[in-house]
Image (cartoon, rainbow, N blue to C red):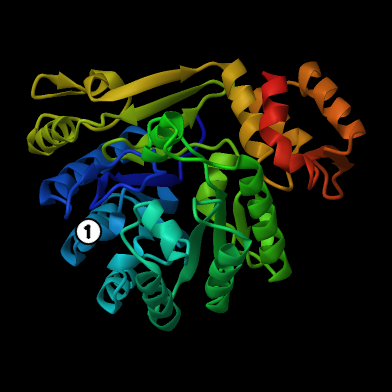
C-alpha cells in the first residue's frame, strides 16, 4: 500500500436537488451538528487506520458543503489539523453554491485554511437554470462571482455545464464570457450527462423532455475552443486551467493514487503492490452513519489504529455494516488505470504503468492503441525526460474516449 496524502469529505445535504444531479444528497436546509461530530470521529479513525502522516490535498464536496455554518467549518478544520499534519503547500478545496457566497463565508474559509473554492455557477442563462432546478438564478450567480473576485484571497474554480435544455451557442458564450471576466484560475466545463434516475433522465424516458445530443456535443466543443482562446489550458476531459493551476486533488483520482473518503456516501480507495485495490463507500443511510460514528467517539475502549479494519466494533456494530466494500482485481484496476489516465490530455508514461503493475503494457491495449493511432485518434511519443513512451488521445480522439474504452473492455 502506498502512502496516502489525500482526503475527500462528503457533505450530503442540499436545500434542493438539481434536475441533472445523480450525486448522493438529502434535502436539508442546514447541516446537523451531529453530522460534523460523526464526521470528525470517522476522519480520526481513517487517518489512524491508514497511518496517514501528512495531507497534501483535502476536498470537501457534496451535496452542498457551503451549508455548513462558520462554527461547523471551524470545528471540522480544527479537528483535521489536530489529527494529522497538513503539508505547507496543501491544496484545500471547498465546493460552494452561489446562493451561499458571502464575505463572511469567504473570511471563515480563509481563516480555516481553505485556499481553493469551487463554485457551481453552471450557467448564466435563467431559462436553463430554471429548467435544471438550480437554486441560484443568473443574478445570484453574478453576485457570487463579484464577491469571489473582490474578496476571495485563494484560487477559484468555476463549474459550468454546456448543453442544458434552453441553452444554445449564444447563451453558452455569454456564460463563458461572464466567468472569464473574473479570471478564475480553473474552469470545469461539463457536457450535460443525463442519468436515468435523475429528473432529466425520467423526463427524457417519458417523452416530456426532447434532447438533441449532437447539438450538445457541438456546444461543448464550442466551449472548449472558447476557453482555449482565452488562455485556459485543456488538461483533462472536462477541465481547463491557467498555467500551473490544475486541480491537484482530482489528479489523485486520475493518476491511480490512494485517497481517503469520509462522510455519508463518501468513497475512498487504497491500492496494493499487486495492482489490486480496496474501495469503500460509506452508507447513504445518514441516521445509521450518525449512530455508528457518534458511538465510535463515545467508546473509550475503541482502538483506531493498526489493522483494525472490519473487526472494529462500536456498540455492537462493525465497520463493514456501515460501508460497502469492493475488492478491485488487478484486471479491473488495470482498466481503471487506462480509463482515468487517458482522461488527461497528456495521457501517461509507459513507466508509470510498469511501476504500478510490474509488467509491460498489455498487448490488447497496444493493439487497440495502434489501430486508433493509424486513424489519428491516439498518439505516442518518446518522452524527452525519460520514462519510456507517452500514450495519449489526440485532440479529436479525446472526444471518442468512451468508445476507445468500450473496445478495450
Q: Dot 1 surroundings within 10 Å: few (below 14), some, or many (20 or more)?
A: many
Q: Is residue 179 left or right of residue 334?
A: left
Residue 173 screen position, x and y as percent: 61, 67
The residue carrying mark 1 is 68
Q: Is residue 156 left or right of residue 38?
A: right
**Extreme bottom residue here?**
150
Q: Residue at x 59, y 42 (%)?
A: 212
Quadrant in the rendering for residue 185: bottom right
Quadrant in the rendering for residue 397: top right
The answer to whether residue 92 is visible is no
Taking depth in this image into account, of 73 and 50 the one nearest to the observer is 73
Residue 389 screen position, x and y as percent: 84, 38
Q: Residue at x 28, y 40 (%)?
A: 263
Q: Is residue 371 above or below residue 91?
A: above
Residue 132 screen position, x and y as percent: 40, 51
Q: Is residue 319 above or below residue 254?
A: above
Residue 278 screen position, x and y as percent: 44, 23
Q: Is residue 337 left or right of residue 126?
A: right
Q: Residue at x 89, y 34 (%)?
A: 375
The answer to whether residue 401 is visible is yes
Q: Residue at x 45, y 33 (%)?
A: 207
Taking depth in this image into account, of 299 and 392 the one nearest to the observer is 392
- Label 1 sits on a secondary structure element that is loop
Picture quarter with the C terminus:
top right
Amino acid at each position: 500500500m502506498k502512502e496516502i496524502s489525500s482526503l475527500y469529505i462528503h457533505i450530503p445535504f442540499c436545500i434542493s436537488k438539481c434536475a441533472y444531479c445523480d450525486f448522493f444528497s438529502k434535502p436539508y436546509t442546514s447541516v446537523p451538528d451531529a453530522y460534523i461530530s460523526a464526521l470528525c470521529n470517522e476522519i480520526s479513525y481513517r487517518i489512524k487506520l491508514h497511518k496517514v502522516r501528512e495531507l497534501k490535498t483535502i476536498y470537501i464536496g457534496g451535496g452542498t458543503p457551503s451549508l455548513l455554518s462558520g462554527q461547523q467549518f471551524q470545528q471540522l478544520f480544527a479537528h483535521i489539523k489536530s489529527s494529522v499534519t497538513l503539508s505547507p503547500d496543501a491544496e484545500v478545496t471547498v465546493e460552494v453554491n452561489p446562493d451561499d457566497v458571502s464575505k463572511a463565508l469567504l473570511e471563515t474559509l480563509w481563516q480555516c485554511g481553505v485556499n481553493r473554492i469551487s463554485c457551481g455557477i453552471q450557467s448564466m442563462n435563467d431559462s436553463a437554470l430554471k429548467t435544471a432546478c438550480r437554486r441560484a438564478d443568473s443574478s445570484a450567480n453574478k453576485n457570487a462571482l463579484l464577491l469571489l473576485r473582490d474578496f476571495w484571497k485563494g484560487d477559484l474554480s468555476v463549474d459550468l455545464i454546456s448543453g442544458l435544455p434552453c441553452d444554445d451557442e449564444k447563451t453558452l458564450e455569454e456564460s463563458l464570457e461572464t466567468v472569464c471576466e473574473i479570471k478564475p484560475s480553473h474552469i470545469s466545463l461539463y457536457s450535460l450527462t443525463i442519468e436515468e434516475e435523475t429528473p432529466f433522465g425520467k423526463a427524457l424516458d417519458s417523452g416530456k423532455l426532447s434532447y438533441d445530443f449532437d447539438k450538445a456535443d457541438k456546444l461543448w466543443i464550442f466551449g472548449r475552443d472558447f476557453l482555449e482562446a482565452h488562455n485556459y489550458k485543456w488538461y483533462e476531459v472536462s477541465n481547463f486551467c491557467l498555467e500551473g493551476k490544475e486541480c491537484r486533488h482530482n489528479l489523485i483520482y486520475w493518476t491511480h493514487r490512494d485517497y481517503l473518503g469520509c462522510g455519508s456516501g463518501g468513497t475512498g480507495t487504497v491500492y496494493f503492490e499487486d495492482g489490486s485495490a480496496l474501495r469503500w463507500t460509506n452508507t447513504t443511510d445518514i441516521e445509521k452513519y450518525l449512530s455508528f460514528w457518534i458511538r465510535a467517539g463515545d467508546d473509550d475502549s475503541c482502538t483506531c489504529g493498526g489493522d483494525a479494519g472490519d473487526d472494529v466494533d462500536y456498540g455492537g456494530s462493525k465497520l463493514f455494516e456501515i460501508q460497502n466494500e469492493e475488492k478491485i482485481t488487478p484486471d479491473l484496476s488495470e482498466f481503471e488505470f487506462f480509463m482515468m489516465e487517458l482522461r488527461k490530455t497528456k495521457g501517461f508514461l509507459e513507466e508509470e504503468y510498469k511501476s504500478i503493475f510490474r509488467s509491460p503494457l498489455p498487448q490488447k491495449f497496444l493493439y487497440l492503441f495502434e489501430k486508433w493511432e493509424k486513424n489519428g485518434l491516439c498518439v505516442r511519443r518518446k518522452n524527452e525526460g525519460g520514462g519510456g513512451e507517452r500514450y495519449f488521445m489526440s485532440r479529436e480522439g479525446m472526444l471518442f474516449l468512451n468508445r476507445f474504452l468500450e473496445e478495450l473492455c
